[in-house]
Image (cartoon, helix red, strand yellow):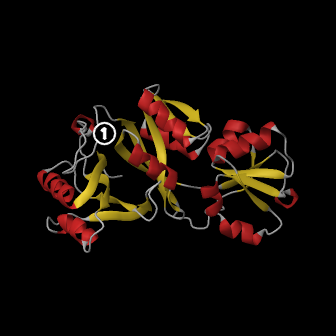
Amino acid sequence: MKVAIQGELGSFSHEAAERMLPRCTVVPCARSAEVFDRVERESVGAAVIPIENTLAGTVAEHADLMLTREVFIQAEYLLRIVHNVIAMPGARLGSLRRVLSHPVALDQCRDFFRRHPKIEAVPFYDTAGSVKHVMANQLKDAAGIAGRQAAREYSGSIVQSSIEDDKRNFTRFFLIRKLGGAGGSRASGKKKGSADYHRLIPRGANKTSIVFQVKNVPGALFKSLSVFALRDISLSKIESRPMRGRPWEYVFYVDFLRGDDEPARNALRHLGEVAEFVKVLGIYPAA
């Protein structure tokens, strides 16, 4: 199966894809939007995307794309993230003036840059891509921050290993596929159509991700969350995000620990009655 990732070969997304789908063919993409485009056009069978990191939080761009694109989460995977400073063979830490990496990766290594104030943190489009750039251009005073797989992929030298701020540094990845059917996966009292996502739910699914918008009335969020409390459904995550193009309006992303069973379906129907809209992002086995 062809699986799209954002970033280059050797990235953490590459590693996550191979662990989730052994023997898959990884298709690197420069931009996140391209990953979702490929899934929707079916030029790939699936994509693996990072959605949340224990140090840096939610990958906002991917959360926003999950709302607007017709994709469905089928699995999640927790990958231990170990960041390494990777440079040209023979380079030493004292000779470095710049270290490039993805902004999320740089954010996970703040302590390293505090300890080395003469080294500039330079945002780059990808972790492995930063190593590829350093090696291709033979930059002797620069390095990239990435995983060991990137060092192997581009013949780089690890100058310093495990520089992440916290050793309990994990990234949660989603495996997403195209959602078939007209109208998307909205499940509310105000449907504009409904896609049959039930055929995409894998065996053993016991976790659900949704996004919804509340009405602008007193107690709207309380009423929305009560649909889960009334049925003893545990929420593992709730987060608000601004709606693009609609200033000061927000959507709520919620993960709850039930699969496609009667209590969950009743909760979603009830939520559809009190919310502006509800979209089921995925139903999958918890990692």
Q: Can residue 23 be spotted in the picture?
A: no
Q: Where does residue 250 sit, x and y in percent of width and height?
A: 39, 62
Q: Can residue 4 be spotted in the picture?
A: yes
The amino acid on which the numbered mark 1 sits, given as a three-letter code, is Gly
Q: Is residue 139 above or below residue 21?
A: below
User: Could you tell me which secondary element the residue under label 1 belongs to?
Assistant: loop
Quarter of the rendering occupied by the N terminus: top left
In the visual, does 181 lie left or right of 131? left
Q: Residue furthest bottom?
A: 218
Q: Is residue 56 above or below residue 114?
A: above
The answer to which quarter of the image holds residue 155 is top right
Q: Where does residue 195 sit, x and y in percent of width and height?
A: 25, 37
Nearer the observer, 157 or 187: 187
Q: Where does residue 48 sit, x and y in percent of width and height?
A: 46, 41
Residue plotted at (47% across, 25% down): 43
Nearer the observer, 7 or 280: 280
The residue pinned by badge 1 equals: 184
Residue plotted at (65% across, 63% down): 109
Residue plotted at (48% across, 33% down): 37
Nearer the observer, 105 or 148: 105
